[in-house]
Image (spheres, grey):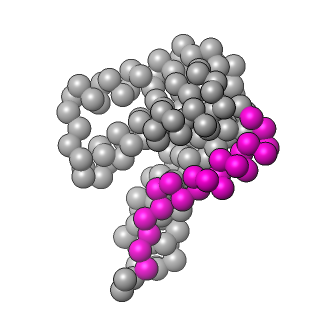
Amino acid sequence: MTQEEAKLVTKGNELAERFVIAFVAYCHMLDDVIDKDNPIDDERLIAENIRFLNEMLINPWVRENQALLWPLIITSFNSWLDANDWEFNDLKEKRRDADVIKGMYHEVVWFVAYLCGGWEHLRTITSKYREYDHNYKEEGT
């Protein structure tokens, strides 16, 4: 997610924007570590961890909303692990659904949009960005 996209999601709330950028970067780093498709050096591993932890522990906006955000973060990480299991499942439906549930971390970002701008803002943001990481390909295409 770009800085400009994060600014739109958070309606310019700088503290929420910092969290969104750190959270999405952390998720992408975890994906790289798990998938091993992009090498992660020690510097990036530690820097992304510290950046995310700083936002979770120090950012006043996150601290104020932590009780709302933390359950979504936990369930998004759980969904990610489920997606990794389903990605190579024998059932076509599970392979297709894996593409959906791997992106559940976006629900954290969408909820930030709701916290920063309410229902109409959430609807605007998800209408614009819902397919952000969609990459499922039908078999045979």
Please tell me in which quadrant of the rendered image residue 16 appears: top right
Relative to 108, residue 137 above or below: below
Residue 30's spot in the image, x, y percent? Answer: 37, 41
Residue 5's spot in the image, x, y percent? Answer: 53, 39
Question: In the shown orientation, is residue 112 left or right of residue 98?
Answer: right
Question: In the shown orientation, is residue 114 left or right of residue 63?
Answer: right
Read off the magenta span.
Answer: 117-138
| Residue name at image x 30 percent, y 46 percent | 32
Q: Quadrant of the C terminus?
A: bottom left
Please tell me in which quadrant of the rendered image residue 85 appears: bottom left
Residue 130 in sight from this viewpoint: yes
Q: Nearer the viewer, residue 90 or 56?
A: 56
Relative to 129, residue 88 above or below: below
Question: In the shown orientation, is residue 9 left or right of residue 78?
Answer: right
Q: Nearer the viewer, residue 72 or 28?
A: 28
| Residue name at image x 29 percent, y 30 percent | 45
Farthest residue to the front: give it: 4
Residue 72's spot in the image, x, y percent? Answer: 62, 41
Please say whether residue 119 is one of the residues in the magenta stretch: yes
| Residue name at image x 74 percent, y 35 percent | 117
Residue 74's spot in the image, x, y percent? Answer: 56, 40
| Residue name at image x 38 percent, y 26 percent | 49
Q: Please tell me how many numbered marks the rendered image carries.
A: 0
Relative to 48, residue 32 above or below: below
Q: Nearer the viewer, residue 2 or 110?
A: 2
Please say whether residue 30 is one of the residues in the magenta stretch: no
